[in-house]
Amino acid sequence: MWRLAVPDFENVRENLLAALTFVDGTVVHLLSEIDHSAILDIYAAYDDNFGQPTVHLEGDHLSEELRQALYNAYSQVQIGGRLANYRNQLKLLAELCPYCGYGSVTDLDHHLPRSKYRAHALYAKNLIPSCHPCNNLKRAKGGDSASAQFSHVYLGAYPTEQFLFASITILQKGIGVVYSVEPVASLSADEYERLKFQFETLQLNDRYGPQINIFLGGLRTSVEECGAFGAPPLKTYLAKAHSSHCESFGANHWQSVLLMALSKSDEFCSGGYKTSFGQHRVVV
Ligand SMILES: [Zn+2]
């Protein structure tokens, strides 16, 4: 689970004009100065509310025609559309999907659903580069309370403190890993609810299973070599690996979180690692 740098594109007006004009110059919707100001105002309101839903952001004060034109114009952000470059610019904001932390970026997710918040269909800060499975699982989810919302990838108040934790169970054959979002001090009550809802909606405990196998497989040689000298050197190695992962990916990336949990697991470090490779199980 990651935050991304806030997109700061300067070509808002150009993109709106391109979106509302056919390639042959035919105007789909004439962007008047009043329309343009109204769009900038509702974008500013979006920022002020950190991208979380309010009735105002539904844009009922804008004309029906304008809202529908913006909604329809999103099709031009698709591959081959007039705004395909805009799509590429947004996708470049993330190397991997910020929701799951491992999927390739193939989609743009509307943080506030396009169907309800038509005025934001093209707004850069409402478009989150993501993988297809995450985008598909999220779909148009987004309720009035924090416990039914996603945290905002650009504008959410993520602390740097660890809030995602993993518990490890050494099984007869394999390892059980269960992640959970915990209400740490620097996480507001609302952000805690959002992150918990997001983690559950994206079914990350299930989806991380194969990723954990692949990740642990990559650590196997080092873990076995350190583990052969006992638990303390293995714990030291895992703690160092955790530290370098935190520097690269942050404390709340699933790999950092897993390394932290493994480094603290007496059972894993005292020999449990021997049966753990390639045998991840989700324990519920
Ligand atoms: Zn994803």
Image (cartoon, rainbow, N blue to C red):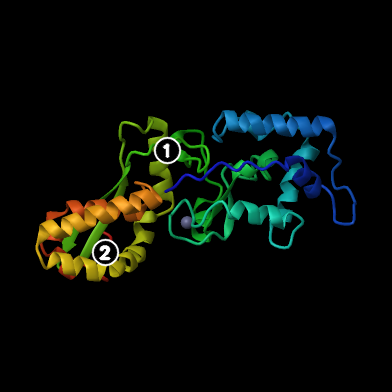
Instruction: Name the residue at 51% across, 62% down.
Output: 104
Density class for disc 2 (Cα within 10 Å; few <14, some 14-19, many ≥20) is many
Q: Which residue is mark 1?
A: 158
Instruction: Name the residue at 54% across, 51% down.
Output: 139
Q: Picture coordinates of residue 281 (x, y %)?
A: 26, 64
Instruction: Between residue 65 and residue 222, name the one nearer to us.
Output: 222
Amino acid type indicated by mark 1? Tyr
User: Residue 38 shows which numbered tag?
Assistant: none
Instruction: Between residue 38 and residue 9, name the one nearer to us.
Output: 9
Q: CA distance from mark 1 to mark 2?
A: 29 Å
Q: Which residue is mark 2?
A: 281
Instruction: Name the residue at 71% across, 50% down.
Output: 74
Q: Is residue 254 visible?
A: yes
Asked if residue 272 is positioned above or below residue 59 in the image, the reply reads below
Pick whichever of labels 1 and 2 is earlier in the sequence. 1
Quadrant assignment, res 56: top right
